[in-house]
Image: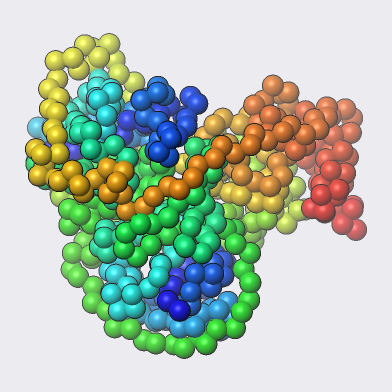
Amino acid sequence: MNIVVCVKYVPDATADRHFEDDNTVDRVGVDGLLSELDEYAVEQALQLKEKNEGTEVTVLTVGPEQAVDAIRKGLQMGADKGVHVVDDSIAGSDALATSLVLAEAIKKVDHDLVVCGMASTDGAMGVVPAMLAERLGLPQVTLGSVIEMQGKEVRIKRDGDTATEIIGGTAPLVLSVTDQSGEARYPSFKGIMAAKKKPVETWSLSDLGVDASQVGLSAAWSQVEDTAARPPRTQGEIVADEDGSGAKALAEFLASKKFI
Amino acid sequence: MTEILVLVDHVDGAVRKTTNELLTIARRLGEPSAVFIGSPSDDAVAALKGFGAEKVYVVDDAEVKGYLVAPKAEVLHQLVEKTSPGAVLISSNAEGKEIAGRLAVKTDSGLITDAVDVQEGPVTTQSVFAGSYTVQAKVTKGTPVITVKPNAATPEQAEGAGAVEQVAVTVSDAAKAAKIVASEPRKATGRPELTEAAIVVSGGRGTGGNFEPVEHFADALGAAVGASRAAVDSGWYPHSFQVGQTGKTVSPQLYVAAGISGAIQHRAGMQTSKTIVAINKDEEAPLFELVDFGVVGDLHAVLPAATEEVNKRKG
């Protein structure tokens, strides 16, 4: 079985994330890493590999040069090889363009399963897995918190907004997994050493047959007109609870704001 | 005036409040047309009409029910072809965003998700990077597809024509490739829905697994109950109540955090609440930096006493 895991290199959420002058996310001036939510996708791919002998896991990313770090992390965790699509004209792409590039790259790699995280930790739209299914014409089995595979049949538990559902589909398909699917493993020392020898291919847009005019900021289907840092919240009154004084003060505050 | 398509979010025919908000927003952009996938009751049609729907497109769900997301995107695609709308508005929940993503690809249109406001243009406002930035954006290609968060607008009643039109659509076999094998509706709690509630009371690690004080305080305030990821991961409260980056994002009038230290992932889910209150034993808890009011104390003592106090004041 061949599994392609799509991962994203994102600015560290605990760092000072900000925008560039052209209203795109600064992806170079802020420390980046493999999106935490994509670690769950790598983990599920590796668990499926362990249960299905002869499985090969490819980690795929689209992003600037440093994005290869995200692939490295996946390889250290235990994936077999990497594909990095890097091209200056991709910078500033929105989800539609990103899904286009990912889909074209996936078509060039043997795939029974395309596995994604539930969302990125920067854009956080959570739409790329559905867009990939649409572009690739594959079944969409998304937002799984429990993943099972028997032969070509995939079943997931999906905790929807109003119901918990069991979703089933037949591979090849697009699978996305949530952070409820199980802790991602840490790379072992052996894994870190082994990753250094694992192959990473670098592809440009021309390798994929995608025209540069289809992607990037100028071709984006939507445009950010303005970004503004939200003014920091100012700390209000903090009281220490002594013999029930806290509860009284709290009720007083809520009443003053007309919540009672 | 151009039509604005609003996908009706309903549970077995009961129209959810977010749909009224979408219809209210749609009136700023053009003439709202509701798209109801299923068989609406007279009450449901009246409700849509009451919030300004000029038309109600009704699509039989025989070919839609039982499959995940893809058929609904096909239905909307065919309605977009038929009506050439000025925009398509969809509720910003997991399914709504996935439908929107597929629709944007099908119609080669721009997509904006998680709008907290939509004004004429349409120009959207989004809250990004864990609520630390506000972004204004617009779609530049095709038919704007916009998913809108709960509480993005106050629903305003306005009588529309509410003309019901049955629409026949075809659903491809490919769209029926992912099946809903089983479905278990979420149990009703009797409390307001988390993302729609005006007041949310959440509990975290500090509850030690006992959510009773949190629930009682919530009930005194008529609030929804939420939980931090730590509480959910410990198995103390169901995941569907998780507030934060990978759970629900809430933006209520009042958010009360009890025994929650306030990791960035949690803040991402509640930072835009109007008023924030925290109760925590640890005066160093980072969440105190954000609060309008904070109590340093044990929630197991403070919340029951506060519940009593609230009930007394309510008389």
Q: Residue at x 24, y 45 (%)?
A: A215
Q: Residue at x 38, y 62 (%)?
A: B144
Q: Residue at x 42, y 39 (%)?
A: A23
Name above or below for residue B100 compared with residue A90.
Answer: below
Q: Residue at x 42, y 33 (%)?
A: A20
Count of numbered labels shown in the rendering: 0
**Measured from the top left, where is residue A80 in percent x and y?**
15, 26
Decide if residue B156 is in sight here: yes
Left or right relative to B281: residue B11: left
**Measured from the top left, where is residue B279 in percent x and y?**
73, 34
Q: Quadrant of the C terminus of chain A?
A: bottom right
Viewer-proximal residue among A103 and A118: A103
Name above or below for residue B258 compared with residue A163.
Answer: above
Name above or below for residue B116 compared with residue B173.
Answer: above
Left or right relative to B283: residue B41: left
Decide if residue B43 is in sight here: no
**Measured from the top left, where is residue B40 in percent x and y?**
46, 81
Viewer-proximal residue among A157 and B196: B196
**Measured from the top left, where is residue A38 in percent x and y?**
33, 35
Left or right relative to A210: residue B308: right
Q: Quadrant of the N terminus of chain A?
A: top left
Name above or below for residue A236 compared with residue B195.
Answer: above
Left or right relative to B249: residue A51: left
